[in-house]
Amino acid sequence: MVRRERKRTGRPRGVVAATAFFCALFLVPHLLDDAWVAVLTLVLFFAFVGQAWNLMMGHVGLLSLGHALFLGIGGYTTAVLLQDYGMTPWIGIPAGALVAAMVGAGIAWLGFRFSVRGVYFALLTIAFAEFFRILFSNWPLIGGTGGYFLRVVPEDNVPLLSLRGGADHFYYLFFVLFLVGLIVSARLVRGRIGMFWSAIREDEDAARALGVRSFRLKVLVVAVSAAMTACGGGAFALMNGSLFPNTLMGMQMSIQIILAPIIGGLGTLFGPFVGAVFVVLVLEFSRDLGQTAGVYGLSTLIYGLTVLGVILYMPEGIWPRLVRLAQPLRRDR
Amino acid sequence: MLLAVHGLTKWFGSVKAVRGIDFGVAKGEIVAHVGPNGAGKTTCFNIVAGAMRPSAGTVRLDGIDVTNQPPEEMAARGLARTFQIMRPMAGMTVLENALIGPLARGLAMADARGEAYRALERAGLEDKAESPAGLLTLPERKMLELARALSTAPRLLLLDEVMASLRPAEADRIVALLQDLRAEGLTILLIEHVMRVVMSLADRIVVMHHGEKIAEGTPADIAANRTVIDNYLGRRGAQ
Amino acid sequence: MVELYLKVAAGGLLIGTVYALIAIGLTIIFGVMRVVNFAHGEMVVMGMYLGYALWTLFAIPAIPAALIAAVVLFGLGVFLQVTVVSRFVGRPQHSQFILFIAFALVITGLHLMLMGPDARSVMAPISFQTYSVGGLRLDAARVQAAATALVMILALVAFLRFTFIGRAIRAAADNPLGAEVVGIRSGRVYAVTAGIGLACAGAAGALVSPLFDAQPFLAPEFTLLAFIIVIIGGLGSLTGALIGGLLIGVAEGFAALLINPAMKSMFSYGLLIAVLLLRPAGLFGGREAR
């Protein structure tokens, strides 16, 4: 089912491919028009947040269906600190990450303390996410259901200080987030902690019998995943300029977050990106098609059918399938 | 006594699986628990290893009360165990399986690799180090269970039916390994059905039946004890 | 004042019976296959649209419409089970989750295409009738919906108790994923189970069509409602689902009366969290642990 990726250092082909890939990503704003840049920004956003979710599910086997909660915490913390307290997102985003990490750790602590497992843990994450969504919807200070709006970017805006700007600016913001997320994930997963996480995913009882302190390691992964997701939420809020509990923190967003890594390939480092490309492109394409045809609901139908097709025919995800396609070339290592 | 268990009792709902058992294991000794299925051996084991909480009774390791300590704590105190149902971490390589223990002891990655490799060598799995643990054969899985337990550098090794469903030649390999380990000073507590192995390996045997200890002694004592033969050995012999 | 409370309690019990039918559909599928139908709410909405269409096109009232919806959804359940879901039994949860999310998207897409995004309400005379029971005035539509739901639940219980396939389903639920051991062909058991699960959702949907306006986006709320009931009652337990449904029906009514209506579902989620943490087997389910 979930497989660890083999380390690829020292393999020229992989290094060349990765370098070319990141260079291409870096050049995107110079090559494509704003509409495409916006689409690819969304891809990077879902790739980054999917990566964060994947740490929990793909590497430790903890299924969260309520990740929109952390997105919301990050988004609202960043936005409120900026708007009402005049704090730069350079402080706001880390603050949001910290709050999300604490909330995540709290939920994890409760869940694991009472040994809530499997599908019950997934339902617990939904319950917390919905609980907070309704709380935020009824919180007048942050606008409730009506939403919270950031003031227009001032004339003398310095993007590097305010982290706000145009399409290209946000593209690079998410590009950096995605890169940092990838590096942090890779370092965690391939190090000592990652070995313990894998052991817990494979068999928690056996891991504990070998001396792995699974409780705190599981709480840790939830906190890290929540913090990363909250960073994505903060940047997302800056980009949109408006926040609504029902869209930012709703069940639909939680589903959207987990589609990319599952479709791309669980427990892999590049799966979430591949999945995000797929999900966002299919979404955009079906939306265009639906609008052209003028049929309401067609886009949802196409989107659903595509997801169905992937889960039916590539249950372990697109990226592992791609890797296997490239594999015969280097079987003889 | 390295391990001293006193008055151990475990209820499962209204069933008393273990009824006030006392036993001990001295340093460097091999003690075997025998008895029919459902006698409470594995339950005792799980309690000692911290995987289950007893309803009553105490477990002492080196004189320190470790009752109710979680399994990871017991591992840190030098106790290692195998599982009756083998649990290789199938998505990881054999070497990675053996790497968890040393890493959990706090060794640096390079040292941990060395330790893991040595543990695999003892179990004769060094050639399989890079293959996925899920692809091992049944005897290899047993050896991996052992290697993983050894990789934690234990003082006390708990073995739950490691010989079961192995061919005699394979079982003899494990017996030889266990004898080597004892010679190096390791203390071993094992559950075993294969009486040939128990008789040749154990210094002392504890016979359990219906959650109670019905006899204890050297292999010679046990062989001479009629109750035991009637209750357990005889019945198994008749099978 | 007392009369108001009584009315709310009675109304809660009535709608709670329909909720119970929805929840039973979810719980029976989980009990037998260990699969969580995350598209359950979509199936309920499908039943609502069927109820709406049958009334608008053929003037068929809710009770016979519920029977028709049950049959249609039973067929859909068997079809989906045989063609797709069977392959996902025993697969990891996230995989099943995505499958049902895909179902939900497809069904919602179809709903939007066929019925549009606007609310559709049944304009039947029954919507304005009331029954008077011992001085309490109760909506006729609610009473009829609850009575029909109760009859269906009882019929289902009888089916599970007295027919061969019903007993096979119960055996499978006692020993999930292991029905083959007792010599039952699990494929058929699973198909019938899926059919029943969806039939419950569809029938309940048709029954509430005179009460709530049908809308595609109601679906997630029904799904989450069913979850809350099922978890509170104990995942996999029919009795638990019934009691849980009544409990939630009444609690919802009082919450809407006594606290801010917008916050009432927060109360439900708070309860869900508490139950998950403290009694993961549900308040009434003893058998199954985490």
Image: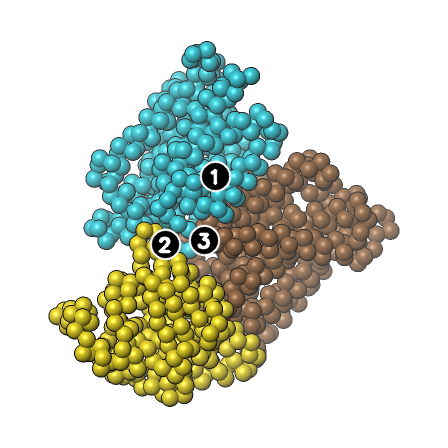
Chain colours: A brown, B yellow, C cyan
Residues marked 3 and 1, same chain: no
Q: Amino acid at mark 1?
A: Ile
The picture quadrant where one finds residue B90 is bottom left
Kind of element beneath mark 3: helix
Q: Nearer the viewer, mark 1 or mark 2?
A: 1
Q: How many marks?
A: 3
Quarter of the image with the N terminus of chain B in it = bottom left
User: Looking at the picture, does residue B102 appear above or below residue C147?
Assistant: below
Residue sitting nearer the eye, B47 or B21: B21
Residue tagged 1: C228
Kind of element beneath mark 2: loop
For mark 1, does the 10 Å Cα neighbourhood hold few (<14), some (14 to 19), or many (20 or more) residues?
Answer: many
Horizontal arrangement in the rendering, residue B215 relative to residue C62 (left or right): left
Horizontal arrangement in the rendering, residue C168 relative to residue A142 (left or right): left
Q: Position of residue B138 (x, y in %)?
A: 31, 73
Q: CA distance from mark 3 to mark 2?
A: 13 Å
Residue sitting nearer the eye, C280 or A277: C280
Residue tagged 3: A118
Residue B4 visible in the displayed image: yes
Residue tagged 2: C90
User: Looking at the picture, does residue A317 appear above or below residue C168?
Assistant: below
For mark 3, does the 10 Å Cα neighbourhood hold few (<14), some (14 to 19), or many (20 or more) residues?
Answer: some
Q: Residue at x 37, y 64 (%)?
A: B8
Q: Are marks 1 and 2 in contact (CB under 8 Å)?
A: no
Residue sitting nearer the eye, C210 or B183: B183
